[in-house]
Amino acid sequence: MPLYLPHFNLQNYNTLASPVCAEFFVAVKDEAELLAALKFAKEKNLPLLVLGGGSNIVLHDDFAGLVIHVQFLGKELVREDENFYYVKAAAGENWSDFVDYCLDEHFYGLENLSLIPGNVGAAPIQNIGAYSVELQDVFSELTALDVKSGLAITFTHEACQFGYRDSVFKNALLDQFIITSVTFKLTKKPNLKIHYPALQSALADENEQDITPELVSQVVCDIRRSKLPDPKQIPNVGSFFKNPVVSLEKLAELQQKYPEIVYYPVDTHQAKLAAGWLIDRAGWKGYVLEAAVHAKQALVLTNPSRLKGSAVLVLAELIKTSVTKEFGVDLEQEPRNYP
Ligand SMILES: Cc1cc2nc3c(=O)[nH]c(=O)nc-3n(C[C@H](O)[C@H](O)[C@H](O)COP(=O)(O)OP(=O)(O)OC[C@H]3O[C@@H](n4cnc5c(N)ncnc54)[C@H](O)[C@@H]3O)c2cc1C
């Protein structure tokens, strides 16, 4: 039987270090414990918050419900074919440790996603991405428990409906499934993706034959450490906003006024603007209110005084309003707010 802890302070369970309380908190290590927790919530009529590493949520106030901390562990090679290894990881595995494990085992494809905080179970929720690779590029399938029926369901790639920082679990199936494991399709031979500008320039002096997945992972970690604050030192949730996608007409209009605007091509109709550039250009980099805009990366909002997440949301609203006014572009928040 899992232990239900009442009036539980979540400060150490979210990377913004928001000191809010959950009415109940439970850690679940396997499916039987998860089913028991769901029964407990149903009997007491409690809303649920499913928690991984807490690195993509804003807890702005106390949560009158049950927080389920998914702690399922384990990883295994489930099958292989001529070109691929299929590797399954339980939802509670730390993402960054899993990437390191795969590199050690020579399972390739995750190197660009090195050092992203959080756990495996949350990675498909927003289709994590970095340095031109997204989870969907290496995804095979996942298993998830239906909150209502308690049945375990397998989701194929197609069923997950992945998009840019998006999936079916943020839309049609919001809050309906708890992911218990994810299986990845990883290559036997290195298949390097190093065209992202920062990665390309960091590797510019290397001989082509010396560029290995291990080196790419190391360079990605170095770049990340140089520009992103470590949440343990300065609480944050990484990028606070998504990069807004605009039409090429809108891009051309902005380029007239701001020739140096930073963007990434999406397709023949659209481009993605660098939200960090917009926020920086609107004058917010380094701004300090109760929360702050990180001095090295304007896309990251920090909570240095470890206040409730509402302090960060106040700053986020000011930034959104100012970016809309300056550029006519609406920013969308990436981390989810609770309650
Ligand atoms: C410094 C920093 C850098 C970051 N860099 C990146 C980056 O480069 N790219 C990127 O994409 N993200 C990045 N992030 C965001 C974050 O790391 C990812 O979104 C990560 O996948 C969140 O994992 P988590 O376990 O912490 O999720 P949590 O914050 O615990 O949860 C996120 C959401 O998923 C739900 N959830 C969690 N686990 C499950 C589960 N098992 N089943 C169902 N729902 C679940 C939660 O209810 C919540 O809605 C960064 C964050 C930080 C702090």
Image: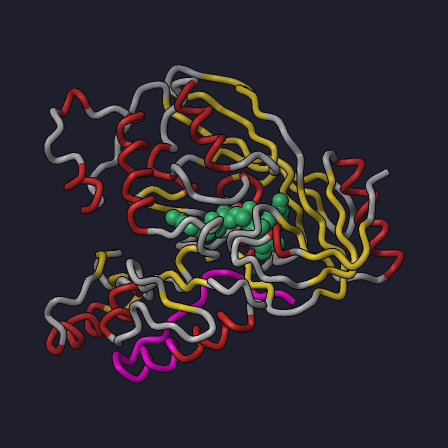
Question: In the rendering, at what x and y percent does residue 93 appear?
Answer: 57, 34
State whether residue 184 appears in this view.
Answer: yes
Where is the C terminus found, in terms of image quarters? bottom right
Task: Identify the image quadrant of residue 263.
Answer: bottom left
Question: In the rendering, at what x and y percent does residue 329 appear?
Answer: 31, 76
Question: In the rendering, at what x and y percent does residue 210 appear?
Answer: 18, 21
- Residue 323 belongs to the span the image colors magenta: yes
Which of the two residues, 221 or 179, is positioned nearer the viewer here? Answer: 221
Question: In the rendering, at what x and y percent does residue 278 appear?
Answer: 26, 70
Up/down of 255 relative to 191, above or below: below
Which of the two residues, 1 or 127, is positioned nearer the viewer here? Answer: 1
| Residue in view at x 34 percent, y 46 percent | 130
The boundaries of the magenta stretch are: 319-339
Up/down of 23 relative to 209, above or below: below
For this view, does 98 lie left or right of residue 318?
Answer: right
Residue at far right of view = 43
| Residue in view at x 18 percent, y 46 percent | 197
| Residue in view at x 43 percent, y 73 percent | 316
